[in-house]
Image: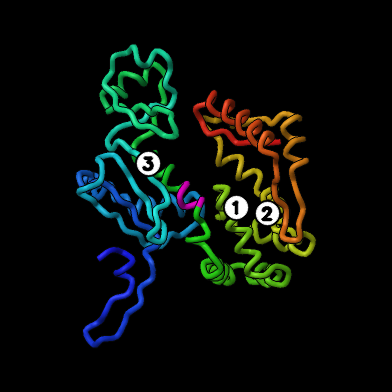
Amino acid sequence: MNNRENNVQSQSNGDISYHEAVPLIISISEQHKDYIENNQLTQWLKNQILIQYGLLLPDFIINYSAELEPYKVIILVNEVKSAEFHIIFQSYRVLNKTNEFGQLGLKNQTTQKQGEIYYWVQQEEKNKLEPLDYLFASDISEFYCYFSQVITRNISEFFGIQETKDLLDQLERKYPELLKECYRHVSIQRITEVLQRLLQEQISIRNIKIILGGLVQWGPKEKDPIMLVEQVRTLLARYITASFIFQQKLHVLIVSAELEEIIRQGIRQTSAGSFLNLEPAQLDLVQDRLLVAIKENYTTPKIVT
């Protein structure tokens, strides 16, 4: 019996019991079970998401499969496959592989993502490479990177009106006047949309007092939810910048005037809000320019205009 069939089960008295879909399932090869459980991965992931984004995840399941490839990980959101990736557990991924890396003769394993080869080494090789200024990401941190992307990309599945109301009910005891003013100007639906959009952009909502203050300030003036989020994002600028600093540096891509003009001309205003509409040739140009710039930098850059 599969997960969908398990959602409705017959009880001994003949009644039907309804069960909601499991919000999150992670499938991993059973050969890593001891390693995953010793690292308490489930609780660690929930704690990291809470610390980084201010989002309290529901309980989820790790399914250990005898049929899954050793390094393959599959994540299901509400029992529908959302992501598949490869992690070489108990190893470190080399972040800044150079042309000389292959000539060092070190033992390594590889995975691929979108045609790009990732190199993984174990602790012994890592110790040899560190004096050569190589940078590494642990298996667990790589796992979290993929995991957090799945969560933020599917944020509406985990954080909706009910979760927003639960959060605001907790805050009401601490900021009663702020919540009263916020409800006067902004509906719970718009508050939810603003929080969802911030989380989709991997922006923390832990600075909720600033976010609510921005909604009180700009809610009566901005009817377009995208522009309302933009005003809130501006208030969070210092915190957003700090969260993307790597080795005391902020890596950015500066968009040229040409690309900025293409993007600006492609913005369309409708009664439902703003959206970007580019011609296929323009879209290819923008994507190609960004991909070239990103590949030249091993860190994850942020785009500013």
**Residue 48: % across, % down:** 42, 50
Q: Outermost residue toward the right?
A: 221
Q: Are marks 2 and 3 in contact (CB under 8 Å)?
A: no
Indicate the amino acid at tag 2. Val
- The verdict on residue 152 being magenta is yes
For the residues labelled 2 and 3, the Cα–Cα distance comes to 32 Å
Measured in 3D between alpha carbons, the distance from the residue under mark 2 to the one under mark 1, in whole angstroms, is 7 Å
Amino acid type indicated by mark 1: Leu
**CA–CA distance between discs 1 and 3?**
25 Å
Q: Badges 1 and 3: C-beta atoms under 8 Å apart?
A: no
Residue placed at 32% from the left, 74% from the top?
Answer: 8
- Label 1 or label 3, whichever comes before in sequence order: 3
The part of the chain drawn in magenta is 149-153
Relative depth, front residue between 252 and 155: 155
Callout 1 secondary element: helix
Q: Is mark 3 on a helix, strand or loop?
A: strand
Residue 61 disc label? none
Residue 135 image point, x, y percent: 41, 25
Where's the C terminus, which quadrant?
top right
Which residue corresponds to the image point at 57% horizontal and 30% vertical from the top-left?
291
Prevalent SS, magenta region: helix
Residue under pointer 1: 198
In the rendered view, does 62 fall on the left or right side of 163? left
Q: Residue at x 45, y 49 (%)?
A: 150
Q: Quadrant of the N terminus?
A: bottom left
Callout 3 amino acid: Phe
Residue that badge 3 annotates: 85
